[in-house]
């Protein structure tokens, strides 16, 4: 029977069935300080051990400072959580990339760049943006802490099979438009719950022109449409990316793996429960106007009138959102003044993202009304950016150049906004208060964020 | 673990779509290393007027005197979307909620609740509206939830709900899901032997 990529990965990892649930084997588990301590405590409480310590890799990212490598820098409670991770990893023989380590980074940036994520793997992490790794042809999804504990103890997870959703992307992006704009448009089309119960496979001719970083940006935000996971069939771009990465297979194993990876695609007549199509050639830069990632407008567009939504619930949601974000229907994006710019997060902090932002930053100076920070996704990204002189471009333009971490995407450290601050952010969530209580978030691409920093308003980078 | 068979309790209604886990429990409370005490911070931004949680927001529904002690929460579509933080269900449970009734739930949140012995019931919008109206008319209406029969009754209305057999069994028996998986360790070991060497990732 013809299979989708998801079907193939599901079948390849099915250990057995328990009362109708699939028991899936987990090849790679990524861990960080926030969602693991209670899982380790649960193991201790039941006298259980970590079954395969070598299949879990841990890093520090969520609650660390972006100004200092000192793990005490963000207060005693954050420090306790970080020290607990060190102890748990030591006690259980788990490899940890702590703050200051050359391999440390945001878990979803670090994993692929270290070569820990291979096509065909199942990948989980106690973080909802784990779908990022689907860009390498994996089945990757976020889990809660109880399931983190389940993976530690059994290297498996009980799952019911999701449905298949195909997102077909056609055409090439215009100048100034990027992968972030694609995924925002996809979420707008699906709505923030439209993919609940599905695994998304992104396909279509657009993908062959996209770098791995761009592909990861797209898969990263699958959860914002409610999807279980997002994935793409691996191709030459994937293999070229992975080859020679520190933890990638080497020698004979590489060739054998490659032979297998080349079988990882959806069969031509595979069944998808749902398909949507987007022509990306016609796409303008996108920006969110509301409080969920499905509330999106074109950068040259205007804030919609809630009355324009035919669905009563969407109408109510739009009305609530506008009330919260302090915007009025009909306002042009370009007339919305911002106070902050955040370039970073597991969505947009890779070297390609920073190059896109720097290419804009070089054209001017950060507006006097704006505070702008650039937070590289990992130590490796930071090193590469500095080697290319990108940090100097940012610093010269008036951006702050920080140390790697999740930072202002969720503000578990001191990178938070104050009430009524308005941020153009390359992160993934514009929920109420996400970046700080009473603050407003507009999700944008790295280029749009950089352009907005220069003009002090949400800015159409194509006009600069 | 304790099992869940039935519940008679007051319900409170927060009919809004897309209530995300950042609203249920904001990030500043995620730096704990244990599972206790999150209930105090549930809906922090909506429930308190200040950051120190000293001043209650009198307009927020959970703060109304007539809704104190509610153990059932009614909400809209896509409840629990966003972050995978299990701290959100921990906060709901610690506050005292045992059952959430909504139009739909986000996947990870649903799994997290199952792992915490919380019952999530999905009902169509019109039925949730009807239940919400009952609460508005008589806030101390007792909702009776019978998991075995998959039946909710309140104010002489009976509404059937359906729940996945596995989830139901898990709740009724209060099963230790990890313990259950550990009973098939032989199958896991056998699977591990079948993984090709080049895919072992060790």
Image: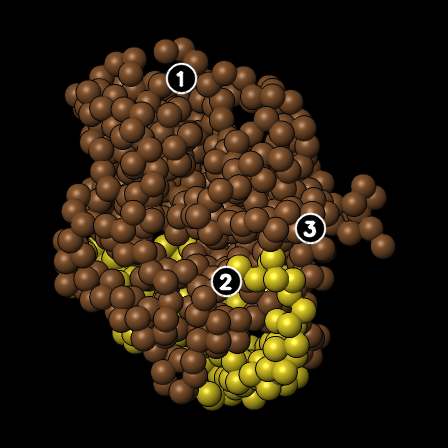
Q: Is mark 2 on a helix, strand or loop?
A: loop
Q: How far apart are marks 2 and 1 (CA)?
A: 45 Å
Tell which subunit mark 3 falls on.
Answer: A
Counting from the top left corner in percent of width and height, residue B92 is at 39, 70
| Residue A415, quarter of the rendered image | top left
| Position of the N terminus of chain A by quadrant | bottom right
Mark 1 Cα-neighbour bin, 10 Å: few <14, some 14–19, many ≥20? many
Residue B197 visible here = yes
Q: In this view, does A82 lie to the left or right of A143?
A: left
Q: Pick the residue in front: A240 or A305.
A: A240
Q: Look at 46% across and 44% down and name the residue there.
A: A245
Q: Please tell me how crowded label 3 is: few (under 14), some (14-19), or many (20+) other residues with Cα within 10 Å.
A: some
In this picture, is A190 found above or below A124? Answer: above
Does dot 3 land on a helix, a strand or a loop?
helix
Residue pointed to by mark 1: A461
Q: Mark 1 lies on which chain?
A: A
Q: Which quarter of the figure has residue B68?
A: bottom left
Q: Colour of chain A?
A: brown
The x, y position of residue A114, in whole percent, is: 43, 48
Q: Nearer the viewer, residue B175 or A51?
A: A51
Query: How far from the left and from the top, in percent, is residue A460?
Result: 41, 18
Disc 3 to disc 2, C-alpha distance: 18 Å
Specify the subunit that label 2 lies on: B
Q: Which residue is drawn at 22% across and 44% down?
A: A66
Give residue B202's mark. Answer: 2
Q: Can residue B6 be seen in this view?
A: no
Q: Which of marks 1 and 3 is nearer the N terminus?
A: 3
Mark 1 → mark 3, Cα distance in angstroms? 42 Å
Q: Vertically, is A26 above or below B10? A: above
Q: Mark 3 points at which residue?
A: A260
């Amino acid at each position: 029977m013809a299979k989708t990529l998801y079907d193939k990965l599901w079948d390849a990892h099915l250990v057995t069935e328990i009362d109708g649930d699939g028991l899936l084997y987990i090849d790679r588990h990524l861990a960080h300080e926030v969602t693991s301590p209670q899982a380790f405590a649960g193991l201790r409480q039941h006298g259980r051990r970590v079954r395969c310590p070598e299949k879990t890799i841990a890093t520090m990212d969520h609650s660390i400072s972006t100004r200092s490598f000192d793990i005490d820098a963000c207060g005693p409670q954050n420090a306790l959580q970080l020290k607990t991770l060190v102890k748990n990893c030591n006690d259980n023989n788990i490899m940890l990339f702590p703050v200051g380590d050359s391999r440390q980074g945001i878990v979803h940036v670090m994993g692929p760049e270290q070569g820990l994520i291979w096509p065909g793997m199942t990948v989980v992490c106690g973080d909802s943006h784990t779908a990022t790794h689907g860009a390498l042809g994996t089945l990757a999804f976020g889990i809660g802490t109880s399931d983190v504990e389940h993976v530690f103890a059994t290297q498996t997870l009980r799952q019911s099979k999701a449905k298949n959703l195909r997102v077909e992307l056609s055409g090439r992006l215009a100048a100034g438009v990027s992968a972030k704009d694609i995924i925002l448009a996809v979420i707008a089309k699906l709505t923030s719950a439209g993919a609940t119960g599905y695994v998304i496979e992104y396909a279509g001719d657009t993908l062959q022109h996209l770098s791995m970083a761009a592909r990861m940006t797209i898969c990263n935000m699958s959860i914002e449409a409610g999807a279980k996971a997002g994935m793409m069939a691996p191709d030459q771009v994937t293999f070229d990316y992975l080859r020679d990465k520190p933890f990638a297979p080497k020698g004979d194993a590489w060739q054998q793996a490659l032979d297998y990876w080349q079988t990882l695609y959806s069969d031509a007549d595979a069944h998808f429960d749902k398909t949507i199509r987007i022509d990306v050639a016609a796409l303008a830069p996108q920006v969110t106007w509301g409080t969920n990632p499905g509330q999106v407008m074109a950068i040259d567009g205007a804030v919609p009138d809630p009355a324009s939504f035919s669905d009563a619930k969407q109408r109510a949601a739009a009305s609530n959102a506008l009330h919260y974000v302090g915007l009025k229907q009909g306002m042009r994006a370009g007339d919305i003044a911002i106070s902050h710019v955040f370039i970073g997060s597991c969505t947009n902090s890779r070297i390609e993202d920073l190059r896109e932002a720097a290419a804009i930053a070089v054209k001017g100076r950060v507006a006097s009304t704006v505070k702008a920070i650039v937070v590289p996704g990992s130590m490796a990204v930071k090193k590469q950016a500095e080697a290319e002189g990108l940090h100097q471009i940012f610093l010269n333009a008036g951006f702050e150049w920080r140390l790697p971490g999740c930072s202002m995407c969720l503000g578990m450290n001191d990178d938070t906004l104050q009430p009524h601050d308005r941020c153009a952010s390359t992160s993934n969530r514009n929920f109420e208060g996400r970046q700080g209580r009473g603050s407003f978030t507009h999700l944008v691409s790295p280029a749009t964020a950089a352009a907005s920093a220069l003009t002090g308003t949400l800015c159409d980078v194509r006009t600069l | 673990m304790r099992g869940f068979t039935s519940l008679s309790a007051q319900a409170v209604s927060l009919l809004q779509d897309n209530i995300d886990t950042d609203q249920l429990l904001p990030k500043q409370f995620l730096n704990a290393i244990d599972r206790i005490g999150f209930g105090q911070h549930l809906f922090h931004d909506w429930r308190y007027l200040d950051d120190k949680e000293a001043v209650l927001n009198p307009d927020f529904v959970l703060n109304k005197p007539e809704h104190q002690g509610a153990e059932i929460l009614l909400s809209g579509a896509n409840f629990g979307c966003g972050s995978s933080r299990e701290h959100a269900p921990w906060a709901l449970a610690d506050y005292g909620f045992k059952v959430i009734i909504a139009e739909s739930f986000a996947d990870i949140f649903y799994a997290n609740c199952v792992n915490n012995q919380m019952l999530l019931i999905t009902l169509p919008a019109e039925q949730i509206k009807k239940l919400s109206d009952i609460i508005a008319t008589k806030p101390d209406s007792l909702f009776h939830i019978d998991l075995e029969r998959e039946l909710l009754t309140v104010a002489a209305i009976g509404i059937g709900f359906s729940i996945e057999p596995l989830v139901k069994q898990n709740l009724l028996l209060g099963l230790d899901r990890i313990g259950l998986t550990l009973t098939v360790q032989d199958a896991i070991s056998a699977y591990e032997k079948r993984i090709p060497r080049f895919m072992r990732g060790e």
